[in-house]
Image (cartoon, rainbow, N blue to C red):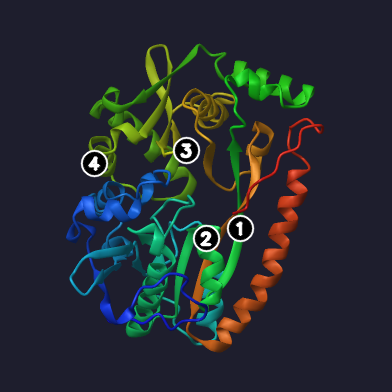
């Protein structure tokens, strides 16, 4: 798939399109893990576990993200004329909108009521993972934006070749989001709740930044979570056994089935990441009377702890908050991590010290009239999201005399 860089906007670093090629691979196994990871996690940038070869490969190998489940890999590979890898982009041909966490079901309904065909569509994202990260993965950071332009052109070319309704890039960085607008994509904004480590040495240091009443509430909540004789332990690396994965998968299936029907991840996925990413995993396990009854799965990045899945086979007051939010803060402080991303939605996180922050997606739509309608909608939606973040920011549990500035870059 030859591409050019002649899209809206300018490429700030030289990268001759005539000497490059963007091609498609239908399995990440086609690309050597070391090569993919040099693009996904180059030196100088914080490690992101979700764009790593190991994570994406586990999704494919386990049958969790494959064509049968509506996730047909169409990963983009940018190379120079000598076949040297320049950049990669995780990409899927989707037959539905499940497992994305950027919701476009209403777009699909509207387009199909008007006589169009919304599916299939193209999506650049990490399946089932609403975590922000780079989506245009360049090996050479001095040419990152130019390679981003090549991959963008390849994405649009592939969308046109497949005659799909649209191409979407979810949970990308703000810089990518802004540059894609210059290349003809529509910008969408949503919100999550993240906790930020302001140099705390202990959990009590964090509590000291809260208003007195809120501080007392959290102490009471944490005591209540353990009041039934529950103990909590952290498992990382080789401490996590296949028996632990069996137990956690039971939690995951029980809670997932009640929340959204059929859980997305297969049992094999957990064994695969447990083998290849063990040092990037934190499993918080909760036990009562010597038996594990709940757990929370987290992935450890270079500067961020990512909360992903929670499950339980017994209900106990405040245990979900303890395992998913308070324990994550404890771990982030102990390991000097900058941030905790606790997943999608959830205003209940606000009372636990998590702050509202924007998250971003970008959308290319083939049909001009449909694109214009979506563009008008997104203007008002972005205004609503930004206002909501401002309002929620005024209702955090933090002391009013402490100023916090979120870096939106």
Q: Are marks 2 and 1 in contact (CB under 8 Å)?
A: yes
The residue under the point 59% across, 54% down is 409
Nearer to us in this view, 346 or 89: 89
Q: CA distance from mark 2 to mark 1?
A: 8 Å
Quarter of the image containing the N terminus? Answer: bottom left
Q: CA distance from mark 2 to mark 4?
A: 27 Å
Rendered location of residue 288, percent (x, y): 44, 15
Residue indicated by mark 2: 102
Q: CA distance from mark 3 to mark 2?
A: 24 Å
Q: Which is nearer the N-term, disc 4 or disc 3?
A: 4
Q: Residues within 10 Å of mark 2 (few under 14, many from 20)?
A: many
The residue under the point 55% across, 16% down is 226
Q: Which is nearer the N-term, disc 4 or disc 1?
A: 1
The residue under the point 39% across, 64% down is 143
Tell me the element at label 4: helix
Residue 272 circle label:
4
Q: Which is nearer the N-term, disc 2 or disc 1?
A: 2
Rendered location of residue 153, percent (x, y): 39, 78
Residue 303 circle label:
3
Q: Which is nearer the N-term, disc 3 or disc 2?
A: 2
In which image quadrant can residue 206 be found?
top right
């Amino acid at each position: 798939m030859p591409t050019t860089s002649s899209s809206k906007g300018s490429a700030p670093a030289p990268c001759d399109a005539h000497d490059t090629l963007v091609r498609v691979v239908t399995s990440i196994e086609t690309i050597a893990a070391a090569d993919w990871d040099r693009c996904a996690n180059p030196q100088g940038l914080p490690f992101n576990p979700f764009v790593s070869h190991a994570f994406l490969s586990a999704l494919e190998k386990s049958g969790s993200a494959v064509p049968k489940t509506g996730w047909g890999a169409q990963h983009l590979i940018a190379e120079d004329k000598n076949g040297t890898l320049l950049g990669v982009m995780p990409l899927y041909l989707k037959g539905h909108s499940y497992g994305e966490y950027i919701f476009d079901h209403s777009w699909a309904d509207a387009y199909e009521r008007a006589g169009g065909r919304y599916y299939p569509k193209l999506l650049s994202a990490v399946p089932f993972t609403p975590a922000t990260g780079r989506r245009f993965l360049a090996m050479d950071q001095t040419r990152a934006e130019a390679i981003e332009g090549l991959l963008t052109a390849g994405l649009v070319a592939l969308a046109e070749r497949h005659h799909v309704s649209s191409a979407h890039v979810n949970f990308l960085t703000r810089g990518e989001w802004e540059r894609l607008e210059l290349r003809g994509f529509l910008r969408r904004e949503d919100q999550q709740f993240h906790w930020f480590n302001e140099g705390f040495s202990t959990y009590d240091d964090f509590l000291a930044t809260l208003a007195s009443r809120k501080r007392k509430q959290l102490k009471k909540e944490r005591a209540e979570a353990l009041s039934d004789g529950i103990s909590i332990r952290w498992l990382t690396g080789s401490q996590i056994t296949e028996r632990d994965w069996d137990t956690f998968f039971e939690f995951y299936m029980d809670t997932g089935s009640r929340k959204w029907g059929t859980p997305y991840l297969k049992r094999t996925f957990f064994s695969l990441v447990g083998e290849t990413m063990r040092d990037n995993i934190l499993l918080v396990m909760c036990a009562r009377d010597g038996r594990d009854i709940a757990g929370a799965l987290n992935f450890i990045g270079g500067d961020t702890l990512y909360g992903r899945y929670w499950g339980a086979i017994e209900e106990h007051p405040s245990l979900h908050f303890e395992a998913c939010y308070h324990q994550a803060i404890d771990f982030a402080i102990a390991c000097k991590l900058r941030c905790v991303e606790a997943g999608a939605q959830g205003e209940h996180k606000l009372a636990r010290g998590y702050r509202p922050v924007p998250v971003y997606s970008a959308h290319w739509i083939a049909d001009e009239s449909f694109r214009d309608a979506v563009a008008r909608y997104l203007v008002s939606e972005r205004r609503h999201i930004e206002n909501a973040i401002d309002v929620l920011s005024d209702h955090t549990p933090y002391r009013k005399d402490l100023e916090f500035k979120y870096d939106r870059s």
